[in-house]
Image: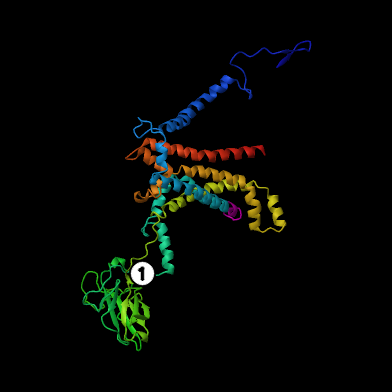
């Protein structure tokens, strides 16, 4: 810098004392270093040192006293449990961010056109306020196998029973004094042929009253009908005792939904289903046939899907993750959607494009930067997923739902801890995250240059 003299001539300013040179931003170097030092110390202590020590420790054996070379890294790619974790992580990285982003995009676009869009966004975003631990406990209950406790199976069983009758009587059987005998394969058949106009009695025992259908009614003795085989199938047991075998008593309930087949010469000639009071009626083709209760009557009732079994545990946990993070994707995409130039959308509509074409050819390309941010953020997030898998997956299937972050915990702090393998898994996770981070940084720089 130069200073003007009285005569108009300029003279140079004296040089600044050592250590006080200004940076390009105009801040003195020492002052800038003083402000940056605490952040650099924290960065070194909490990030750089743990990373460096993990890399160092990954080359040593379980005790940490002997150099193991690449043995720990070889174990990662040869141990079946860890390979399962690697495969599951690949599924998580591909499926979870994609599904959450797509749902977020759909919600963001649709809520722009509904009256209560803000309230809907609030409801969808609310799971983000729940911790992973709490969400894991919630979905552990949602996926309970018992339909009386798990809402997922309660809904599934309700839908199934709407289209397929699920009334079963497992354990039901006739007594020796009853007119039925075993027919093989779990079925029962009458000892004698039946005749039209003569009511048939099909009593069974072995069903707990609590497991009877809720709408079962007291059994009613069938009335004879000309040209038809009528009868009653009922639970030959009175709560509290009493009653007469082979006789319909007032306190005994009908076996609603029991299937009855008329069989002649090994061929089914007629079928019927017992009503709420156990009564049934067969056409005249059943005259002279034997009545068979097929083994399908005695199956366990449909109990839903084993959501937390080996086959479905990973998709089930991914579903809980999407429930939490679809709201995050929706909010970011909705913010990007609000900034789109509306004249481009209107121009596309004026040119004759329908709503689907506007969405696919205009809205989505314009939202590409926002979609990339959401997708990359969720990919980094799922690489570290731990809480949901640890809480939701039962111990018996935790190996099937295993992911790298959970395996890192198990290898480092489990009953047979191996800090060398645990450190190698941590390094592998870091190497998997770095390409995603570099992609995000390059994308941000390209956006800055525009």
Identify the residue at image location x=49%, y=40%. 432
In the image, residue 59 sits, relative to residue 133, either above or below, namely: above
In the rendered image, residue 112 lying in the magenta stretch gets the answer yes
In the image, residue 281 sits, relative to residue 40, either above or below, namely: below
Rendered location of residue 45, percent (x, y): 46, 28
Locate residue 120 relative to residue 182 in the image: left or right: right
Rendered location of residue 19, percent (x, y): 58, 16
Rendered location of residue 25, percent (x, y): 63, 25
Task: Report whether residue 122 is seen.
Answer: no
- In the picture, the quarter occupied by the N terminus is top right
In the image, residue 103 sits, relative to residue 411, either above or below, namely: below
Disc 1 target residue: 167
Locate residue 61 relative to residue 346 in the image: left or right: left
Colour pattern: rainbow
In the foreground, 246 or 57: 57
In the rendered image, residue 305 lying in the magenta stretch gets the answer no
Q: Residues within 10 Å of mark 1 (few under 14, many from 20)?
A: many
Q: Secondary structure at mark 1?
A: loop
Magenta stretch bounds: 108-116
Locate residue 225 relative to residue 383 in the image: left or right: left
Residue found farthest to the bottom: 226
Task: Report whether residue 333 is seen.
Answer: yes
């Amino acid at each position: 810098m130069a200073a003007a003299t009285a005569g108009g001539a300029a003279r140079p300013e004296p040089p600044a004392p050592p250590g006080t040179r200004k940076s390009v931003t105009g801040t003195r170097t020492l002052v800038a270093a003083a402000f940056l030092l605490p952040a650099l110390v924290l960065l070194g202590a909490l990030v750089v040192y743990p990373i460096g020590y993990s890399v160092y420790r990954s080359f040593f054996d379980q005790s940490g006293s002997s150099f193991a070379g690449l043995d720990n890294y070889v174990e990662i790619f040869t141990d079946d449990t860890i390979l399962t974790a690697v495969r599951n992580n690949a599924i998580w990285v591909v499926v979870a961010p994609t599904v959450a982003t797509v749902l977020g995009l759909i919600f963001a676009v649709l809520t722009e056109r509904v009256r209560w869009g803000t309230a809907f966004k609030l409801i969808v975003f609310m799971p983000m306020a729940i911790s992973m631990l709490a969400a894991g406990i919630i979905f552990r209950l949602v996926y309970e196998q018992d339909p009386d406790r798990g809402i997922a199976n309660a809904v599934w069983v309700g839908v199934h029973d709407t289209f397929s009758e699920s009334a079963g009587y497992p354990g039901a059987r006739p007594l020796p004094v009853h007119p039925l005998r075993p027919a093989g394969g779990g079925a029962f058949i009458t000892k004698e042929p039946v005749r039209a106009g003569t009511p048939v009695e099909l009593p069974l025992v072995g069903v707990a009253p609590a497991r009877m259908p809720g709408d079962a009614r007291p059994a009613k003795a069938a009335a004879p009908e000309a040209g038809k085989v009528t009868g009653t199938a009922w639970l030959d047991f009175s709560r509290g005792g009493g009653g007469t075998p082979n006789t319909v008593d007032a306190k005994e309930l009908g076996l609603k939904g029991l299937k009855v087949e008329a069989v002649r010469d090994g061929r089914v000639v007629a079928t019927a289903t017992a009503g709420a009071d156990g009564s049934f009626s067969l056409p005249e083709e059943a005259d002279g046939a034997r009545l068979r209760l097929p083994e399908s009557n005695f199956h366990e009732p449909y109990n839903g899907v084993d959501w937390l079994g080996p086959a479905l545990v990973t998709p089930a946990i991914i579903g809980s993750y999407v429930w939490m993070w679809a709201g995050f994707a929706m909010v970011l995409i909705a913010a990007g959607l609000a900034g789109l130039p509306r004249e481009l959308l209107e121009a596309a509509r004026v040119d004759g494009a329908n709503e689907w074409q506007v969405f696919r050819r205009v809205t989505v390309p314009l939202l590409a930067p926002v979609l990339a941010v959401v997708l990359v953020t969720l990919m980094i997030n799922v690489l570290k997923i731990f809480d949901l898998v640890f809480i939701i997956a039962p111990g018996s299937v935790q190996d099937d739902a295993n992911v790298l972050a959970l395996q890192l915990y198990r290898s480092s702090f489990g009953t047979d801890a191996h800090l060398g393998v645990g450190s190698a898994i941590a390094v592998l996770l870091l190497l998997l995250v770095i390409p995603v981070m570099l992609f995000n940084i390059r994308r941000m720089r390209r956006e800055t240059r525009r």
